[in-house]
């Protein structure tokens, strides 16, 4: 057998990042032992295991270094916690959520002393329209280290969650001392302009759903509606994810070819506009992963190579954890997006073979796809949130086919809303479809089994996913082929 080096290295790296994030600080002697084992296995022609262990060691080291760095920064902020201080910095993030504005500040220093602090600070204050991204701000407040909200169930680690965003301290209701107006970035300005246009054209709650769908403003949806999405098993639809990128890519590609562009140029236009979309929705990790996967597929298309979904998924996850290892174990959105993609690529074909040949109402493919994604994502949902929606299988079959129309007509309402006759028609259709979709969400969330309390510890979680990967190797031809190939 000849080793497929890239998938093996990617898998080993991801395993190392995961284990290193859990067991940091990693014992130095374990690293030495694994390194010697990797060299020995490679030298004795056990290339697959040798490369796997080598990548595992590198992942362990990378995760360990980043964990130690975070601990050091938290300890530094700990010296200022629960003490009122003057802080200065530049606003690089701003979002309104219900009655509060959340502000993220970078390039932080202590007022007058000039001492620089690493990372970012998150500030929570009453709603305000005085601040914009790019402004410089001075404030007086009490910095606090992240603490777990007792209302949040599940295995939520606040310090690791905020560290993945570069946030190491929180300030609630500070006193604003001074605001120096700066230049708002073009993308931020465009994003807010589009949001305002949506709110002007569409009534609530259709406006909130459209803003969440197209621009990533999740908190424009009222809390009750967000809870209904979770209880109905449909939260993955409204959260910016790979599914959004896929829908958008198909829409742009079909529109480009309909306008007469050749396929190669249409692929290029689709890639560029998908990247612009990621900029507009504020770089969600799941969306970035999807764009990387799409870029790999398009590169293979242009170079005349055959690409495989599992390989593209592994490479995209490797590249993202190379930049920010924290997202692997702390970003549930990234985890669910990557697992859902694994379910569609690997689990779906396996399950499809074992389902009978009858295709009632032509729903077999949709049913199997939904079941495969739920099967692969349910353990992480149970572990993270200690709950599971048992109605998700049915609600997804009903709601998922409607959701692309929410995106399409929401986009058309923004684009054509000011045009005589056509604009009002697009707004009317967008509003009707959005409300119809939300009605399905609301009804689904009230069905028996919509919110079942369940729990799972980390050992069981690891064992479950190990079994799933093991069975994937046995039953999935593609999974086997990307790790080993026969000699020619």
Image: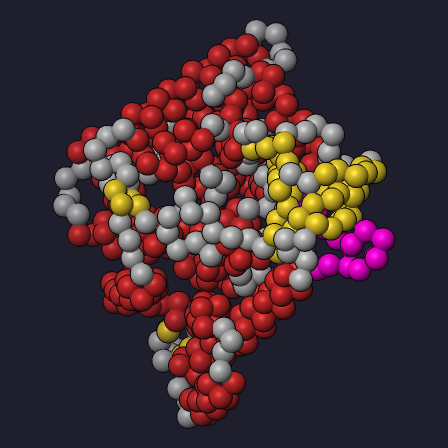
Q: Position of residue 214 (x, y in %)?
A: 54, 32
Q: Give the residue at the far front of this rendering.
A: 83
Residue 252 appears anywhere in the view: no
The magenta stretch spans residue 106: yes
All told, the count of numbered labels is 0
Image side of residue 189 versus residue 317, left or right: right
Residue closest to the eye, 90 or 187? 90
Residue closest to the eye, 111 or 272? 111
Residue 226 appears anywhere in the view: yes
The magenta stretch spans residue 415: no
**Image quarter for residue 81?**
bottom right
Taking the spot 37% from the left edge, 20% from the top edge, the residue there is 436
Taking the spot 47% from the left edge, 57% from the top edge, the residue there is 157
Q: Where is residue 86 in the image (x, y as percent from the top left)?
A: 76, 49
Residue closest to the eye, 73 or 187? 73
**Image quarter for residue 178?**
top right
Q: Position of residue 393 (x, y in %)?
A: 26, 39
Taking the spot 29% from the left edge, 25% from the top edge, the residue there is 443
Residue closest to the eye, 27 or 150? 150
Give the extent of the magenta segment: 104-120
The answer to whether residue 440 is above or below residue 244 is above
């Amino acid at each position: 057998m000849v080793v497929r080096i890239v998938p093996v290295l990617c898998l080993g790296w991801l395993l190392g990042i995961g284990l290193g994030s859990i067991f940091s600080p990693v014992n130095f002697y374990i690293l030495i032992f694994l390194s010697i084992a990797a060299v020995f296995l490679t030298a004795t022609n056990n290339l697959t295991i040798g490369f796997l262990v080598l990548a595992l060691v590198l992942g362990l080291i990378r995760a360990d270094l980043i964990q130690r760095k975070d601990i050091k920064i938290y300890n530094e902020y700990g010296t200022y916690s629960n003490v009122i201080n003057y802080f200065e910095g530049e606003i690089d993030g701003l979002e309104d959520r219900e009655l509060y504005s959340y502000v993220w500040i970078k390039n932080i220093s202590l007022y007058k002393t000039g001492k620089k602090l690493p990372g970012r600070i998150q500030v929570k204050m009453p709603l305000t329209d005085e601040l914009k991204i790019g402004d410089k701000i001075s404030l007086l407040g009490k910095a606090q280290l992240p603490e777990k909200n007792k209302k949040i169930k599940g295995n939520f680690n606040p310090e690791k969650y905020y560290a993945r965003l570069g946030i190491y301290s929180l300030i609630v209701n500070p006193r604003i001392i001074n605001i120096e107006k700066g230049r708002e970035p073009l993308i931020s300005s465009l994003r807010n302009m589009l949001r305002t246009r949506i709110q002007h054209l569409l009534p609530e709650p259709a406006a909130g759903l459209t803003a969440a769908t197209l621009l990533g403003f999740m908190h424009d949806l009222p809390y009750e509606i967000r809870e209904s999405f979770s209880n109905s098993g449909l939260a993955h639809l409204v959260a910016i994810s790979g599914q959004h990128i896929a829908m958008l890519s198909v829409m742009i590609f079909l529109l480009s070819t309909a306008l007469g562009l050749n396929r190669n140029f249409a692929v290029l236009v689709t890639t560029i506009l998908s990247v612009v979309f990621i900029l507009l929705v504020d770089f969600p990790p799941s969306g970035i992963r999807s764009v990387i996967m799409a870029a790999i597929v398009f590169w293979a298309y242009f170079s005349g190579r055959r690409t495989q979904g599992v390989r593209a998924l592994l490479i995209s996850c490797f590249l993202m954890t190379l930049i920010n290892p924290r997202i692997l174990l702390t970003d549930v959105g990234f985890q669910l997006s990557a697992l859902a993609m694994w379910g569609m690529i690997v689990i779906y074909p396996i399950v499809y073979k074992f389902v009978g040949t009858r295709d009632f109402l032509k729903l077999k493919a949709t049913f199997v796809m939904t079941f495969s994604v739920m099967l692969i994502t349910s353990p992480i949902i149970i572990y993270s949130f200690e709950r599971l929606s048992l109605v998700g299988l049915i609600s997804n079959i009903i709601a998922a086919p409607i959701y692309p129309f929410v995106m399409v007509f929401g986009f058309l309402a923004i684009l054509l809303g000011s045009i005589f006759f056509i604009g009002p028609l697009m707004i009317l259709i967008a509003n009707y479809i959005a409300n119809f979709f939300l009605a399905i969400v609301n009804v689904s969330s009230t069905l028996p089994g919509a919110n079942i309390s369940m729990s799972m510890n980390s050992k069981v979680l690891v064992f479950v996913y190990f079994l799933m990967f093991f069975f994937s190797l046995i039953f999935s031809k593609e999974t086997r082929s990307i790790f080993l190939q026969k000699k020619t």
